[in-house]
Amino acid sequence: MSGGVDSSVTAALLHRAGHQVVGATIKTFCYGEVDGPSNTCCGLEGIGDAKAVAGRLGIPHFVFDAEANFAEDVIDDFVSEYAAGRTPIPCVRCNSFTKFRDLLGRADALGCEHMATGHYARIRRSPGQPTLLCRAEDDRKDQTYFLWGLDRAALDRLLLPIGELHKSRVRAIARELELSTADKPESFEICFVPDNDYRGVLRRYLGPGHPALSRGDVVLHDGRVVGSHEGYAGFTVGQRRGLPGGFPEPMYVAEIRPEARQVVIGPREALRTSVLRAERANWLAEPPLPGEEIGVRIRHGAPVVEAVVTAMDGDRFELELLAPRRAVTPGQSAVLYRDEVVVGGGVIVR
């Protein structure tokens, strides 16, 4: 229970259905060391809101300290990815490790049979068949993009009660039950960067003299230097803001070269690509084979587009997109689908 309306209604629906429900919130970092609002996911205000909802429902509520594991699994990865010139998604790491792996261990200790979350996704169970993760009924809210890294065995114990609902219905249920989170606005900040100053986090972990935070050149693809920057960690592929001007057309970040401390820029067309490579793959369904046509989502909220699997090698795969896409960003996820079923995914590296 993060303290938001989605997990609040999840707990309420299960309680109303007759399950013996235990509320759990994870404390992921030291809030006293972080400036900014405290109403982020799992922040101090969120813990209080989760406890209030649990009290309203009459269920026990626990707060578990996962700070050490969260720092190792999520924050360290966040820092190392930016240092490597990529743009990470900490929510994928948090779901893959802290929220599911660590909380399932807590569930075992409490004797709980299942674990439920307020994610917009669905579980499909058929007799004699593997459990499958599927896209939400409301595709505009679908959160399977953040769930591809789950342990496949965790799906067998996972319940996702609001995956069949639209957000408006979730809020309506919360109002009907007079839950204090019914009209709480959604939080979009990274929980450990509530002030949105992620460079401050990098400075704290890397030190101000790290190459990712040091001056370098802004160049064109042919190597011509057209400006300078104060650290390539401040840029991401597709970014337009903060780049040198004076060109006949808008320029965008097309590539980051950390070994040379270069930010490569180019016109909009320079962002188009029809190929991508991903690593650290995780499979929630039968892995695809080379030559298979498959759906892929390259960023949260983007449409699922068609691609062909051109190579599979252990935990790596390559795709050819049937129609070129712009700003395929290293560090983001490539999530693969067969219709509504999540096949798996990986981290884009090129």
Image (spheres, rainbow, N blue to C red):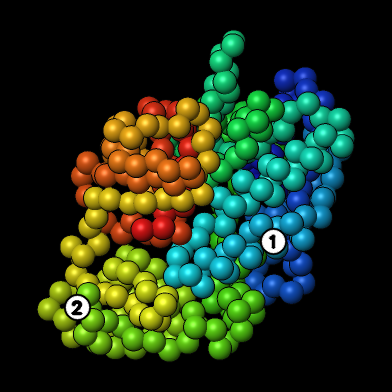
Q: Viewer-nearest of labels 2 and 1?
A: 2
Residue situated furthest left in the rendering:
248
Name the N-terminal-most of marks 2 and 1.
1
The residue under label 1 is: 72
Query: How far from the left and from the top, in percent, is residue 225?
Result: 25, 87
Q: Nearer the viewer, residue 279 or 27?
A: 279
The image quadrant that residue 320 belongs to is top left
Mark 1 secondary-structure assignment: helix
The residue under label 2 is: 222
Left or right relative to 40: residue 103: right
Q: Amino acid at mark 1?
A: Glu
59 vs 189: above or below: above
Q: Amino acid at mark 2?
A: Asp
Residue situated furthest front in the rendering:
313
The image quadrant that residue 306 belongs to is top left
How many neighbours does mark 1 have within 10 angstroms: few (below 14), some (14-19), or many (20 or more)?
Answer: few
The image quadrant that residue 58 belongs to is top right
Q: Give the distance between the C-alpha atoms of the residues marked 2 and 1, in whole angstroms.
A: 39 Å
Mark 2 secondary-structure assignment: loop
